[in-house]
Image (cartoon, rainbow, N blue to C red):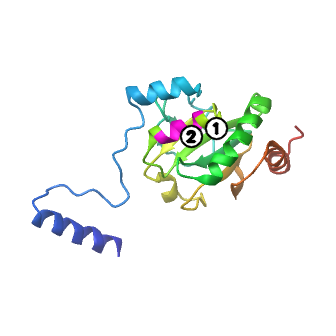
Amino acid sequence: MTRTLTALLAVLMLLAGCDEVEEPGKTDVDVDTAELRQLKDQAGIEDCAEGQGGGSLPAVTLPCLGGGPSVDLSSLRGPMVINTWASNCGPCRKEMPALQEFYAEYGDRVAVLGIDFLDVQPGAALALARDTGATYPSLADPEGLLLEQDGLRLANGNPQFLLLDSEGEVVHQQAGGLDDIDEVLAMVNEHLGLDL
């Protein structure tokens, strides 16, 4: 059905005088501009960093939100909490301060990484991070590339959690909506086998 819709769209675009047709769901969102870098700096958001390698996440490289190094997800190992979020997500707004509190308290033992997921407004995303005090690094996936990856059960929505163990294996996935640091801590201790 998708191929039929794409073909129909291509024919309609050609008839209208357009010669380029993008695949449905593809975006041209730039997550690294001078303005976005300035917003990221003002918010105190840390840069993204490539991992040690050997993880089980798909070999998908995502850009760092607001500039900085891109990261191949397959390089990531834990213990790590990965949280998807977006600028228009109400539960994310409530959850991000709890994640930030966890990051401030335990980030030296359990990494925290955000992914601005299915969000085509990087400026609004950085503003949300600033407003919630979230300084942990965040990647950007405006196109939803992670939805297309085998082995991930990401839903088309936010927030969501993935927990990685020290070998880079996804040991737990769940919908988000956690309200405080105690809930984050309980999730991490239970599924990563830690005693923080």
Q: Residues within 10 Å of mark 1 (few under 14, many from 20)?
A: some
Give me the C-alpha separation between circle 2 and circle 1.
Answer: 6 Å
Residue type beneath disc 1? Thr
Residue 115 sits in which quadrant?
A: top right
Give the residue drawn at x 79%, y 45%: 180
Magenta segment's dominant SS is helix
Badge number at residue 132: 1
**Which range is magenta?**
124-130
Kindly identify which residue carries mark 2. 128
* Image coordinates for residue 174, horizontal then vertical, percent: 70, 58
141 vs 77, left or right, is left
Is there any visible trace of residue 167 in the rendered image? no
Give the residue drawn at x 57%, y 37%: 138
69 vs 84, left or right, is left
Pick out the residue farthest to the right.
195
In reply to whether residue 126 is colored magenta, the answer given is: yes
* Image coordinates for residue 105, horizontal then vertical, percent: 80, 30
In reply to whether residue 75 is colored magenta, the answer given is: no
Is there any visible trace of residue 180 in the rendered image? yes
Q: Which residue is more in the foreground, 53 or 10? A: 10
* Image coordinates for residue 186, horizontal then vertical, percent: 85, 48
Q: Are the residues at dot 2 and dot 1 in contact (C-beta closer than 8 Å)?
A: yes
